[in-house]
Image (cartoon, rainbow, N blue to C red):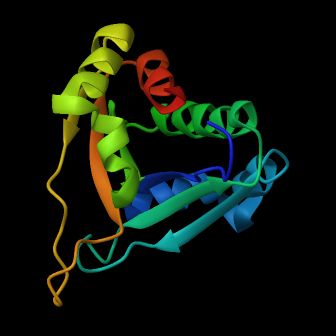
Amino acid sequence: GGGRETPIRLLVAQEEAAWVVGKRGNKITRLRDLAKVQMNDADSPPFDASERFLEISNATLEQRLRVVQMVLEDLSSRQDAQTELRLLVPTEQFGSVMGHKGETIRRIMSATGARLQQHKAEKLEDGSEHRLRLIEVRGDMQQRLEVVRQ
């Protein structure tokens, strides 16, 4: 929608992160021609300290999706390529992703053919919810990309 863009955030394993960045950062530099692309350590807890947040922002949706596509295509060339995409959604936007009684997420699944699995909000030590919630997206590359678009 309009207003402030929401960065696209992916949770990637350490070795995937190294792959995406490339030798001396050559791959992530190419991605940065399209959007602001940052690779940061995942918040730990709740996520594993070895994992990374890949954050894509400051660009049109099409450009951000293009970056996601390039990352997915790149990762799919790894030997132990994953068929799932781990999408991080801001907790305060999670309700709109789910929709009333899960209608929206079901609509996305039927529209894309992908399978989405949401994870419970992780609680922090002070009892508050972590700012991001994880949704695992399973499907072929086109399906996963379409989920991110929606």
* Left or right: 148 as drawn, with respect to 66: left
* Left or right: 26 as drawn, with respect to 133: right
In the image, farthest residue toward the right: 33
Asked whether 85 or 29 is in front, the reply is: 85
* Left or right: 54 as drawn, with respect to 116: right
Looking at the image, can residue 85 be seen? no
Residue at 56% x, 30% y is: 73
Q: Is residue 50 above or below residue 148?
A: below
- Quadrant of residue 23 within the rendered picture: bottom right
In the image, farthest residue toward the front: 100
Q: Is residue 138 above or below residue 98?
A: above
Looking at the image, can residue 11 be seen? yes
- Measuring from the top left, give residue 62's x and y in whole percent: 72, 30
Tally of marks: 0
Residue at 52% x, 35% y is: 72
- Measuring from the top left, give residue 61's x and y in whole percent: 69, 35
Residue at 63% x, 33% y is: 65
Q: Is residue 80 above or below residue 23?
A: above
Quarter containing the N terminus? top right
- Measuring from the top left, give residue 59's x and y in whole percent: 77, 46
- Measuring from the top left, give residue 53's x and y in whole percent: 47, 63
Asked whether 141 or 100 is in front, the reply is: 100
Residue at 65% x, 50% y is: 5
- Quadrant of residue 120 within the rendered picture: bottom left
In the image, farthest residue toward the bottom: 126
- Quadrant of residue 15 within the rendered picture: bottom left
